[in-house]
Amino acid sequence: MKYYLIAGERSGDLHGANLIKAIKQKDPQADIRAWGGDMMQAAGATLVKHYKDIAFMGFFEVVKNLSTILGLISFCKKDLKAFQPTVVILIDYAGFNMRIARFAKQEGIKTFYYISPKVWAWNQSRALKLKRDVDKLFVIFPFEKDFFKQYDYEVDYVGNPLFDAIADFQPNPNFRKEARLGQKPIIALLPGSRYQEVAKMLPSMVAQAYQFPDYQFVIAGVSNLPKELYARWQSLFPVKVVYDDAYNLLSVAEAALVTSGTATLETALLNVPQVVCYKTSAISYSIAKRLIKVPFISLVNLIAQKAVVPELIQDEFHTQRVQTELARLLGNSEARQQQLEGYAFINTILGEKGASQRAGELMVKYLQTH
């Protein structure tokens, strides 16, 4: 069978790669074409577009790049018609993928969605569009199954794919030495994987290096972004950068400052106390504030349905507030212990590893029986 996968971010590339491996186990002759990244390509997909060329964040940033995005959508539609896949498999990346879902439905192409758009967070009417355009939806949070039931939409809960990545991770015992980090305790900085968010987040993160002289601050950099983006801060603050190795960095970190997104849950599953941070353009934030329907922005707090980790959003994300919240997590503090207890609770909610495996097996089964 022929599969066409679309992932628009780094995390989608990881989950897409694991999904491809599962599909190939059940369908060894699978012909897979994809928008994604290096991991999906290594797993056996023919890469059409790399996510680094299509990742835009925030309402203002999307509007500013609208002509580029519309051009990419048009190209994708033409490529889909030329390839004529058995199924289109969409992975997160809602703004782009929901448009492609509508197109695929109109073209009579079967459509699966893995890692649902966060329609429960804002603009919940989009749940009806998913029901209309997506043949099978595979969700990764337990509460999503109940949410979609409100719309008479039966979905498959497959577990959370981050468990796969975390379970497969083996810390490098020589990481400190190889990364030249020495033995000074580490605070990890995870500013994100997209240019705009890293540029927004890093200034207040790196500023903490002078506030905590007994710690070394290490940025989890990504190699698909320009090195100059990190180097400018290294010239101003005593911070180091480790590229494409966030898990090993977190494995030796005492605490972390993390941009809201998938990384907050990864940090929690690796048991590292964190301060969640988020800042976007004033226009994007103003729009989002009116639309968002949930009480938290971090996946950690959303899953727990309570405040496990502190969230510093927009105007609250400034040097002094970050310093205060970070200080509360260091040493053997009560705040630190409470956060770790919250992490243990989240682990019991999310279940076991194998989400991508289960999703891949179900997808092939559905295709073979319908």
Image (cartoon, rainbow, N blue to C red):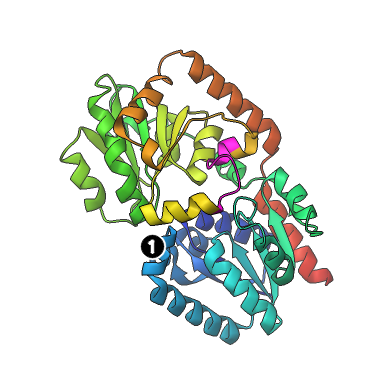
Q: Nearer the viewer, residue 115 or 147?
A: 147
Local crowd size for mark 1, using a 10 Å CA cut-off: few (<14), some (14–19), many (≥20): some
Please state the horizontal and vertical placement of residue 248, each as a whole percent of the image: 42, 36
Snapshot quadrant of residue 190: top left
Which quadrant would residue 233 be assigned to in this image? top left
Whether residue 167 is visible: yes
Q: Which of the pair 338/158 is nearer the observer?
A: 338
Instruction: Tell me: residue 46, above or below residue 212.
Output: below
Q: Nearer the viewer, residue 28 or 50?
A: 50
The residue that appears at 56% across and 28% down in the rendered structure is: 308
- Magenta segment includes 299: yes
Give the percent coordinates (x, y) of residue 338.
Answer: 55, 19
For this view, does 264 lie left or right of residue 240? Answer: right
Q: Residue at x 56, y 39 (%)?
A: 296
| Quadrant in the rendering for residue 15 | bottom right
Place of residue 331 in the rendered image (x, y in percent of width and height, measured from the top left):
41, 15
Image point 44% across, 61% down: which residue?
Answer: 59
Q: Which residue is mark 1?
A: 61
Is residue 349 toward the left or the right of residue 48 in the image?
A: right
**Height in image: 65 above or below 40?**
below
Q: Which residues are magenta?
A: 291-301
Residue pushed farthest left? 235
Quadrant for the N terminus, please. bottom right
Residue type at mark 1 is: Glu
Report the residue that reaches farthest toward the right: 369
